[in-house]
Structure formats: structure tokens, C-alpha cells
Image (tube, rainbow, N blue to C red):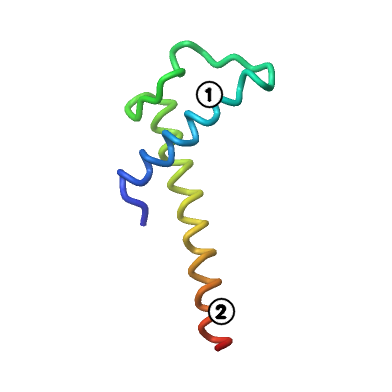
Amino acid sequence: MTTREEKIKWAKLFHDTYETLAPFFGYETRDDTKEFDPTSKNGKLMLEVCDEVLSQYKQEILEKVKGEIIED
């Protein structure tokens, strides 16, 4: 399970990276979403997206480690 602190950390990283890269792709984000706000609708969505992505990634790592242990 991903803690709230982890979700906020990763959501902010994704958000800030997106904001940095968006202009290079000709996209201008809305003024009301330029700053990450975990209590906004956009922020809550990003937190849940990060939770899903991190959960899947952690599961993949766990499966890989289990496979390596079994092979040894």
C-alpha cells in the first residue's frame, strides 16, 4: 500500500514535470492547475493515479525479486 506522503511526493513530481515539459510540446496548462494542490479535484485525481501506478510498479518489483530468489 502506498502511504499518503508517498502519493503526494510522486503526484507533485509528476505534476511539476508535466508543467515543465508542457510548453515544449505547445501545451499551456490552465492557470488554476499550475500549482499542485492535493485537495483540488485535479490533485485528488493525480494522487489516485500515482497510487495505482506505484501499486502496480511495486507488485512488478516484488514478482521480479521473488523470481530471482526462486532461481537462486
Residue type at mark 1? Glu
Left or right placement of residue 30 versus residue 11 in this view: right
Distance between mark 2 and mark 1 Cα atoms: 38 Å
Residue that badge 2 annotates: 67
- Count of numbered marks: 2
Q: Position of residue 26 (x, y in %)?
A: 68, 16
Lateral position of residue 18 relative to residue 6, left or right: right
Residue pictured at 66% horizontal, 21% vertical: 24
Question: Dot 2: few (<14), some (14–19), or many (≥20) neighbours within 10 Å?
Answer: few
Q: Nearer the viewer, residue 21 or 4?
A: 21
State if disc 1 and disc 2 touch (CB < 8 Å): no
Q: Which residue type carries mark 2?
A: Gly
- Label 2: which secondary element: helix
Q: Which mark is residue 19?
A: 1
> Of marks 2 and 1, which one's residue comes earlier in the chain?
1
Q: Is residue 35 above or below residue 8?
A: above
Q: Looking at the rendered structure, which numbered label has been put on residue 7?
A: none
Q: Secondary structure at mark 1?
A: helix
